[in-house]
Each structure stands twice: as structure tokens, then as C-alpha cells.
Image (spheres, rainbow, N blue to C red):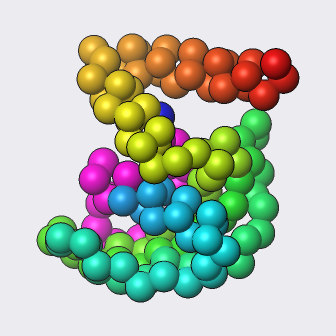
């Protein structure tokens, strides 16, 4: 599953495709130690930055990223966190989880999947 934790956003609305793209690009940047990446993929183009600072929101912690992108819906500036758990995952694991999450039946089911998925990941850490 992909967790997109938005700290702030300005401009056009982010859709699910934008969120997934930003998380995947951020994970690849963190795994390669890149602080900056110019991106262009389909209707998305722009820049993603990080200084690898750790951010904490409630019980979620991870690396903070900033992106300035242009999409078919307009310009977007966004600050977001990618969780520590997601940063260590391979691209195929991230996208497989998001497909499972998106295929459930509605908002309540999405919440339950997220809670169960997070609990399973945390349990695996201590095994």
C-alpha cells in the first residue's frame, strides 16, 4: 500500500495517479541518495526535492519531500512525507499494495485495509 501523507498543497488538486507517482519517485530518490530529481512522465513534469530531514506527524514518521509539478489540471506545489516503512520497499511491493487497497469496497473498507496493513507491517518488524 502507498501512504501519501500530505503536509501542504497549493494549486490544482492532486489525483491518485499524481500521489502514486510522487511516492514512487520519492522512494527511488531516497534509495539512491538523490536530493533532487527532475521528473517527466506522461502529463506530469516538474521537480522533486528533499533534504532527507525526518518528519513526524502523530505516529507516522518518514522523510519530507517537496514537489513543484505541472499536470494536465494545472500547477501544483506540495510538501509530503513518505513513511519509513514505504521508503524501504521495492517498487513492485508499493504498487501491488496500492492495487489491493484501491480495489476494496469504499472508504470504510479502505480505512480497515490501511489499519490491517500497517499492523501487519509493524508486527513483521518485531518478528
In the displayed structure image, the side of residue 79 where residue 14 appears, left or right: left
Nearer the observer, 17 or 125: 125
How far across and down, in percent of the image, does residue 33 sit?
A: 66, 74
Residue at horizontal 78 percent and vertical 61 percent from the top: 54
Q: Quadrant of residue 100 in the image?
A: top left
In the displayed structure image, the side of residue 103 where residue 20 appears, left or right: right
Disc count in the image? Answer: 0
Camera sees residue 77: yes
Q: Quadrant of residue 120 in the image?
A: top right
Residue at horizontal 40 percent and vertical 15 percent from the top: 108
In the displayed structure image, the side of residue 115 where residue 47 appears, left or right: left
Magenta highlight on residue 107:
no
Q: Residue furthest right?
A: 126
Camera sees residue 57: no
How far across and down, in percent of the image, does residue 116 sit?
A: 57, 15
In the displayed structure image, the side of residue 73 where residue 88 appears, left or right: right
- Magenta residues, start to end: 2-20
Q: Quadrant of the C terminus?
A: top right
Residue at horizontal 52 percent and vertical 47 percent from the top: 90
How far across and down, in percent of the image, does residue 2 sit?
A: 47, 41
Nearer the observer, 52 or 66: 52
How far across and down, in percent of the image, does residue 40 sit?
A: 28, 79
Q: Is residue 43 above or below residue 87?
A: below
Residue at horizontal 36 percent and vertical 79 percent from the top: 39
Nearer the observer, 65 or 29: 29
Amino acid at each position: 500500500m502507498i501512504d501519501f501523507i500530505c503536509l501542504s498543497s497549493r494549486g490544482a488538486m492532486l489525483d491518485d495517479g499524481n500521489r502514486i507517482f510522487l511516492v514512487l519517485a520519492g522512494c527511488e530518490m531516497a534509495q539512491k541518495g538523490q536530493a533532487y530529481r527532475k521528473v517527466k512522465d506522461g502529463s506530469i513534469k516538474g521537480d522533486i526535492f528533499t533534504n532527507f530531514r525526518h518528519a513526524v506527524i502523530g505516529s507516522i514518521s518518514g522523510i519530507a519531500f517537496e514537489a513543484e509539478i505541472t499536470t494536465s489540471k494545472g500547477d501544483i506545489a506540495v510538501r509530503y512525507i513518505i513513511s519509513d516503512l514505504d521508503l524501504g520497499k521495492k517498487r513492485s511491493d508499493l504498487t501491488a499494495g496500492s492495487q489491493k487497497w484501491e480495489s476494496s469496497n469504499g472508504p470504510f473498507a479502505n480505512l480497515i485495509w490501511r489499519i490491517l496493513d500497517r499492523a501487519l507491517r509493524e508486527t513483521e518488524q518485531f518478528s
